Amino acid sequence: MLKNKILLIFGLFLMFTFLVVGCKSDPETPPTETPVEEVPPVEPTPEPEPVEEPEPEIPQEPSVSEEELLANAKKAAENATSMKDKIEELSFASYDESSYSEGLLALEKYNSLIEEGKAQEKLDNAILAEKEFKEVLDKAYSKLASEKKSEVIQIREKALEIKSQKADKVGYDAAQLLFTTAEASTATKEYEIAYNYYVKAKDAFNDVYNNVSAKRTAALEAIERAKNKAADVDTFAAEADKIAPLSQEEANQEAE
């Protein structure tokens, strides 16, 4: 019995020893690490190189011959001379004395270059004279047009007071059209044209006013004559009745 117990204990001891040694001999499996995939760095996208646009070609002015330059200079000088004569004839120089003086100098310079001098220089002076004299004329006609416009408005108001737009519609509308044309020319800085149309508009409104006034006066006179005639008839009848009164029967017949 004792021997069997000892053998049993010894067997259990051996089994326990094997178990312990077996556990120690198995190494622990290290945790498996998931490999991290390395992302390659993103290279910056290179900016596109700017495309140089070709510069626009500047159109070359066609070359002008010497003869053409001289012809243009002569034409401009003739026009400038014509404007100068007009300024002096109408005594417009005082409206812009500075421009008038500059125009004279440029025209004199042109005339001094007629025999000698470059064609382009002649043209430049002729054009300058033309420009300066036009400035004088524009200022003069601009002021005159403004003054004439005021006169037109005054006579138009008088025409409206006597109902001319109804009494003479055709004439009034025609005058108004001239005034509107003058206004349009002023807006486009065509002052001489504007002045001339203001003059025409004033004359037209004057005619309308005078015609309607004459008709109105004639109508009033006719009414007055009719009133006077009626009064004369009544007076004559009253006098006749005093001299020779009508009988009742005659009075009834007269009334009928």
Image: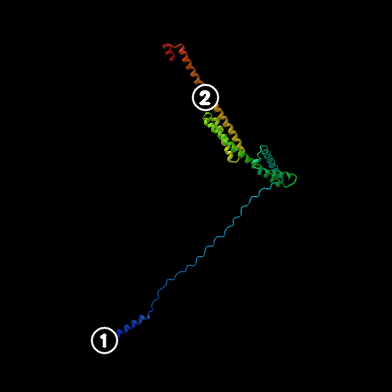
Please tell me whether residue 166 is drawn above or below residue 59 in the rendered image.
Answer: above
Question: Which of the 4 image quadrants contains residue 71?
Answer: top right
Q: Is residue 222 above or below residue 21?
A: above
For the point 32% across and 83% down, the residue is 16
Q: Amino acid at mark 1?
A: Lys
**Residue 90, position as x, y percentages in the image:** 66, 37
Q: CA distance from mark 2 to mark 1?
A: 170 Å
**Residue shown at the point (52%, 24%) measured from the top left:** 220
Nearest the viewer among 58 and 244 is 244
| Position of 224 relative to 40 (above/below) | above
Q: Which residue is mark 2?
A: 220
Single out the residue that lies furthest toward the left: 1
Position of 41 compared to 93: left or right?
Answer: left
Q: Which residue was labeled with disc 1?
A: 5
Q: Nearer the viewer, mark 2 or mark 1?
A: 2
In the rendering, at what x and y percent does residue 68 appear?
Answer: 70, 44
Q: Observer-nearest residue: 123 or 47? A: 123
Left/right placement of residue 6 relative to residue 67 reads: left
- x and y percentages locating residue 33 in the rendered image: 42, 72
x, y (%) of residue 184?
57, 38
Q: Residues within 10 Å of mark 1 (few under 14, many from 20)?
A: few
Disc 2, SS? helix
Contact (Cβ within 8 Å) of mark 2 with mark 1:
no
Disc 1 element: helix
Q: Earlier in the sequence, mark 2 or mark 1?
A: 1
Residue 12 lies in quadrant: bottom left
Instruction: Report whether residue 217 is seen.
Output: yes
